[in-house]
Image (cartoon, rainbow, N blue to C red):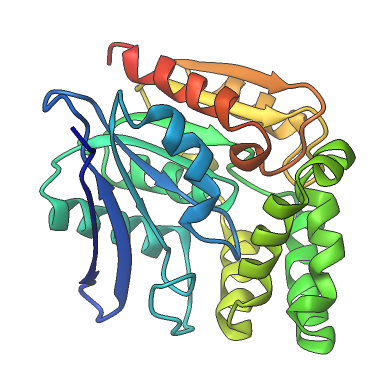
């Protein structure tokens, strides 16, 4: 029996159209998980992870506002605003609660969602992410947006590819690298700048002590964007967290190591609240 995938859109309370895909599981009692993508990409970063999990969970992916197939309407983007979008998306698909996992920017959104809507987040997956970029890193987000304005999104493509993926992965799977870069280059600049500002300004550390749910933290060993030290800080602050460090991987482990991410998330889904 083929798995059912419902591709649709909904309109948020402030009038933004969000595109989503809901994949039903063969078992009606299967756990539910929301996957949130990283900065300047879209829900396709989860394709390999979804393939590995689709028998065992109902999976909801979507394109954040300003990204992918969703409305590209720039404004003041915050982690809290993006978290509200998640809550309204859950309303749209009639899920009261779910495990919420995010990569990089998506991890910041997942943290904000769990802190703001604690009754709706049953578990948390934090992948290649942080609760706060240090002051230098935050300033670099605004510099990156300025560089994109000057050189165009394509001017950052080589930098991003090397930051996202190990040298071995780039040589071995050029088609996956090119696919991610194509999504990156197609971004609306103003939305990209607004999303960079979201990460520059986000400080979710005050929420961490209140989170009493199972958490899986995963990071690439060679992640320069959200290094292992940031993952360890999350692990130390979150009482029910586990930490996995993936040898040789860089920043986009859902693409570079989809089987390892799927395994970590399936283990998370089995943990009791």
Taking depth in this image into account, of 230 and 210 the one nearest to the observer is 230
Residue 75 in view of the camera: yes
The C terminus: image quadrant: top left
Can you tell which quarter of the image residue 184 is in? bottom right
Q: Is residue 62 above or below residue 71?
A: above
Q: x%, y% of residue 141? A: 73, 66
Q: Horizontally, is 261 left or right of 149 in the view? A: left
Q: Horizontally, is 113 left or right of 143 in the view? A: left
Q: x%, y% of residue 151? A: 84, 85
Q: Residue at x 70, y 64 (%)?
A: 181
Q: Residue at x 48, y 78 (%)?
A: 76
Residue 214 in view of the camera: no
Q: Residue furthest front?
A: 1
The N terminus: image quadrant: top left
Q: x%, y% of residue 176? A: 68, 51
Taking depth in this image into account, of 225 and 257 the one nearest to the observer is 257
Can you tell which quarter of the image residue 121 is in? top left
Q: Is residue 52 above or below residue 168?
A: above
Taking depth in this image into account, of 255 and 235 the one nearest to the observer is 255
Q: x%, y% of residue 226? A: 72, 42
Q: Is residue 37 above or below residue 190?
A: above
């Amino acid at each position: 029996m083929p798995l059912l995938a419902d591709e649709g859109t909904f309109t948020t309370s402030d009038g933004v159209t969000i595109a989503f895909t809901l994949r039903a599981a063969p078992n009606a009692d299967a756990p539910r998980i929301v996957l949130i993508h990283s900065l300047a990409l879209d829900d396709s970063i989860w394709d390999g992870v979804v393939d590995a999990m689709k028998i065992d969970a109902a999976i909801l992916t979507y394109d954040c506002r300003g990204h992918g197939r969703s409305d590209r309407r720039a404004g003041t983007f915050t982690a809290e605003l993006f978290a509200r979008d998640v809550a309204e998306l859950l309303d749209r698909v009639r899920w009261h609660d779910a495990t919420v996992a995010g990569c990089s920017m998506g991890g910041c959104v997942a943290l904000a969602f769990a802190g703001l809507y604690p009754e709706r987040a049953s578990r948390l997956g934090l992948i290649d992410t942080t609760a706060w970029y240090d002051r230098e890193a935050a300033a670099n987000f605004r510099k990156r947006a300025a560089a994109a304005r000057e050189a165009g999104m394509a001017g950052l493509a080589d930098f991003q590819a090397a930051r996202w993926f190990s040298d071995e992965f780039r040589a071995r799977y050029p088609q996956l690298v090119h696919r991610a870069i194509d999504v990156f280059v197609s971004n609306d600049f103003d939305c990209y700048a607004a999303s960079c500002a979201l990460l520059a300004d986000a400080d979710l550390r005050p929420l961490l002590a209140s989170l009493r749910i199972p958490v899986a933290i995963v990071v690439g060993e060679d992640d320069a964007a959200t290094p292992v030290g940031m993952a360890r800080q999350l692990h130390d602050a979150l009482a029910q967290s586990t930490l996995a460090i993936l040898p040789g991987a860089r920043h986009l482990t859902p693409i570079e190591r989809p089987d390892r991410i799927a395994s970590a998330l399936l283990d998370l889904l089995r943990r009791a609240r």
